[in-house]
Image: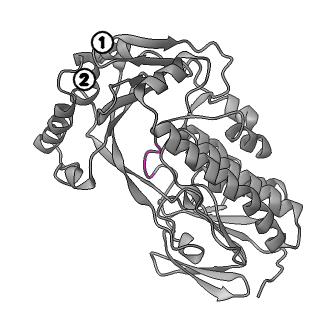
Amino acid sequence: MTTTTDVTTTDVTIIGAGLGGLVLARVLHLHGIPATVYEGEASPTARTQGGMLDIHDYNGQLALKAADLMDEFRGIILEGRQAMRFVDRDGNVLLDKADDGTGGRPEVQRAELRRILLDSLPAGTVKWGHKAVGTRALGDGRHEVTFADGSTVTTNLLVGADGAWSRVRPLLSDATPEYVGRSFVETYLFDVETRHPATAKAVGGGSFGVIVPSGERAWIAAHRESGATIHTYITLSKPLDWFADIDFTGTGTGTHAATARLAAEFDGWAPELTALITDADTAPVLRPLHALPVGHRWDRTPGVTLIGDAAHLSIPDGEGANLAMQDGAELGQALAAHPGDVEAALAAYERELFPRGAAAAAAAVAVNDRTPEELLAALTGDAEPS
């Protein structure tokens, strides 16, 4: 049975305080619609929030405009970080493109972007330490969420903004993310101008990547972050079993063994490049990459929907955070445009969401399937990398 619920008098329940969920809460707040965000982390600083994000003028920035946060956003942009440098594995420069200030993808730290969103919400909007472990339908568009501490909440509108392993998604879909056959391993170098000058010079001032011959299964990308930090993404096309043989939880000799195992995949590369692995100031952190089926969608189900990776997790290509924010903004605007009719709002939102998510996922697959020659040709031209 489809019901009509007035969201101006009934809180919207958002699971997940990532960028998408927070944009949704902010847009709803601007329209006078109360919302509560439940987040499993104990506090805003419970864990690091990842590295740099390029926020695009055709989706992420539009979401921030809808959230009335463009001034705050401009205040956290790291100037010069739109520069790009690509080299071969011997360190020879293949492309070196300066940041001339005209690009539409300014770089910010994810943690700073999350901070300005949190600061824009009324106190108490985010309920920290509430890890959702289950959801169930109660009928008439109402749902119950159970948290790890045994507490529950009942809501007339439930939004899953809880990422790849969403606890809300099973209410709508049987789809689960599948491993895409490659993983990131993250490392950091700190105080690079003083402590790692050769690598700092090689990486340059913005985004960096190594172009490898077709068929190679290992490559490196990196970003220059704030505070003279280089954040490295070692990418390996390996089965999960290969990574299972490496101890990523160890310290001391365990970390050294993991680092040596990773570095062995880059034997013969220029030392200033392998130093991104061997000289890392942090232990390597494994990030297996998963994706939902391209074109993932669901039937309209009363009282519940998804945004961001919960809806359309795909191979990383620089669009994920931008799409999550766009989803959050458009859902908030749809709810504001249909006062008193949640189902009309959700239907309108999903009509735009499904083709957008499918197109983005297909584009991500196409980008990741490019040969090195095709990638370099795209980069050498005026086209921005996807």
Residue at left offset 76%, top offset 46%: 67
Is residue 78 or residue 84 the one in the foreground? 84
Image quarter for residue 255?
top left
Question: Is residue 382 left or right of 134 when viewed as pictured?
Answer: right
Q: Position of residue 83 (x, y in %)?
A: 53, 18
Q: Where, by quadrant of the figure, is residue 35 drawn?
A: bottom right
Decide if residue 344 is on the left or right side of residue 55. right
Q: Give 85 or 332, whichever is nearer the viewer.
A: 85
Q: Which residue is mark 1?
A: 198
User: Badges 1 and 2: C-beta atoms under 8 Å apart?
Assistant: yes
Q: Residues within 10 Å of mark 2 (few under 14, many from 20)?
A: some
Horizontal and vertical percent position of residue 299: 67, 73
Which of the marked residues, 1 or 2, is nearer the chain's N terminus?
1
Q: Is residue 212 magenta?
A: no
In magenta, the rendered stretch is 46-50
What's the magenta bit mostly, secondary-structure-wise?
loop
The residue lying at 41 percent from left, 24 percent from top is 209
- Residue shown at 36% from the left, 14% from the top: 202
Q: What residue type is disc 1 on?
A: Ala
Q: Position of residue 5 (x, y in %)?
A: 82, 78
Residue 122 seen anywhere in this rendered image of the structure: no
The amino acid marked with disc number 2 is Ala
- Figure check: 109 above or below 156: above
Q: For the residue labelled by badge 1, is the local secondary structure a helix, a strand or a loop?
A: helix
